[in-house]
Structure formats: C-alpha cells, structure tokens
Amino acid sequence: GRPFLETVTVAVSLAVAAIPEGLPICVTVTLALGVLRMARHQAIVKKLPAVETLGSTTVICSDKTGTLTQNEMTARSVYTLAFPSISFGLTGVGYDVSGVGVGTRKKNGGFLFRSASTERLEDDESDGRRVQRVTESSMEFKAISALFATASICNNASINNNHNNNNNNKHNNANNDNGEKSTMAMGQPTEIALLVGSAKASVPDPRPIYHRLQEIPFSSDRKRMEVRARPVGGAHTCAAFALAARRLPPSGDSNYPISPDGSLYFVKGMPESILGECRTHTAADGSAVPLTEVGKARALSQTRRMAACGLRVLAVAYGPSLE
C-alpha cells in the first residue's frame, strides 16, 4: 500500500477538486436573488444565509406584541379572592384613556365591569344583562382599588393625556389634527397596560403622593418586582393599605411583619411565586383575611383559566414585609 501521508494528501486533493471554483459565486448570486424576491414582498433580510433557512421554514413562532402588532398590551380580565365567584373585565383597546368612562361603546376609552361568572372571561359589551359596570360606589371597589393601586405603585411606566394643538408635541399632532386629547405612554407595554387599566377602573395613580424608598427590579430567577413606598403625607390612598400599615401582630406571634413607619411593600409578578409567600388576602371591605389552601387553589385555577384564553397573567400583593 501507499504511505499514510501520501494517502491523506490524495484524499484532500480529491475533496478540493470536487468543489467547482465557481460554486461560491453561484451560491451568493442565488441567495441574493432570494433577498430581492423577499424585498418585493416587503420583507427585509439582513443576512444572505437567512434566505435559505426561511425558504425551508414551515412554522414560525413569534411574540405578537411589537412584532406583529403596535407593541401595545391591554388589561382584559381581573380576579380577586374577595369575590371568588365573580369575573371582572375591562373594555376598550390600546393606550388611549381620553374617552375613559364616556359611554359604553367608545372604543378608545373603557371601563371596568363584572360578569356573571368566572367562566366568562371575554369582553361582552353587547349583552347588557350580563355586563354590570363597577363604579366607586360598588361594593367591589375597595378590593379592586387595592389591586390596581398596587399595580400602579409597583410600576415604572407613565401615561399622559396631551392636547394635540400643543406645538411642542409634534408626535401627537401627527396622529390627530382634530384638537382632541391623545395619550402619550412611556415604559414597558405590560406596565402601561396596568396603568391604563387603573384609569378605566377609576383608580387614580397614587404614585405622586408616595415616596419610593426601595425598588427590587424584576429578574428571571425571582419572577417578580418589589417596591417599598411610604405616603408623603402619612395617609394611604387606599383603605386596604391603611389597614395593612396599622395591622397589629397576633398575640404570641413575634415573627408577624409590622410597618413601624407606615411604609408598605408592593409586589407584582408570577402568580405561583407570589401566592407561595402570602399569608392573607384582601377582603371586600379592604381588611386582611387568612389565605387558606382552598383560596390558593382557587386563585391558581383562575390563573390557568386565564392563561388558557391566551392572556398573560400577573399577580399583585402588598404588605409591611416581604417575609
């Protein structure tokens, strides 16, 4: 036989000779033609090899928010253990809150309503017998206000209503030249949606009268965000918050968390992560009642039901301590 080195040399030579010199040029031209064809269909491809991959793709999984839509989210359904058999919903779409509370058919506004059952999660404005609007005089408002106030305080987004006839706001003028109010939103879509939901529920943003003492940002490990805040004037905006700040520990429980300075922690994040560390939940009158295993199971069941409807589910909580 031939020496090993000579055999390897012959093998490499044959392998190189099998590839035509013009093959790279032909591949480049073919991929370039594919890029041009994609461009005619309003699709921009930055890298040539991506055309080959896209040509053999049968299924594309994409996050629709911001990719296929306007990068806007909308709060659609609300649940609280204070009323375990009732499902709450929010009408309207988008971030425009200029029409909030004006009529029941205004698409750029919205309001909070209660449905007949937790089985009904979708918005049903056409059936007036099932949809009942929740107002500040409703018995559910104390629990709902605690929920949305927590979501607003544990939030870094902002929304502002601006008149379009203001020359200093050219962006809003480009969207609407009728002199009407428009909404300018800044922040993460999820947090903006919570602020818009609070406005629809007639819960004012409490952050201007709260002093933020600490913030623990959201992380993929902890799956929640915490904010510690204290009211500037000493009085909480929500009855449930005032009761939580003044809550005394049960006799014999030295580890029960208390708030010596009136500050509270406000948390939002993954329901499983938050429910696992909660001792109580908000009752209809804003007071705190023990959170039982039955209550946790009921909340998690509603969470799964919402997720099955294609909703992104978040839980909120508040208290004098994170422990």
Image (cartoon, rainbow, N blue to C red):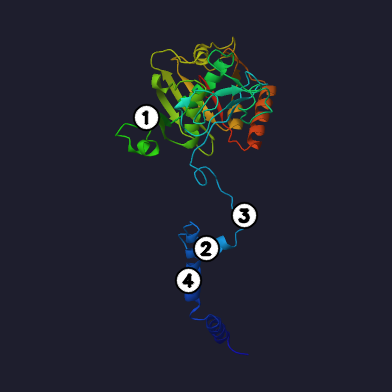
Instruction: Please indicate whether residue 30 sits to the left or right of residue 139 in the image.
Output: left
**Helix or strand or loop: what does disc 2 sit on?**
helix
- The residues tagged by marks 2 and 4 sit, at their Cα atoms, a distance apart of 11 Å
Q: x%, y% of residue 5?
A: 55, 84
**Helix or strand or loop: what does disc 4 sit on?**
helix
Residue drawn at (52%, 42%) of the image: 65
- Please state which amino acid type lies under the numbered disc 1: Asn
Which callout, 3 or 1, points at the residue further toward the start of the chain?
Answer: 3
41 lies above or below 257 = below
- The residues tagged by marks 2 and 3 sit, at their Cα atoms, a distance apart of 15 Å
- Please state which amino acid type lies under the numbered disc 4: Thr
Residue under label 4: 28
Residue under label 2: 51
- In this view, the residue farthest toward the top is 251
- Please state which amino acid type lies under the numbered disc 2: Val
- In this view, the residue farthest toward the left is 167
> Mark 3 or 1, which is nearer the eye?
1
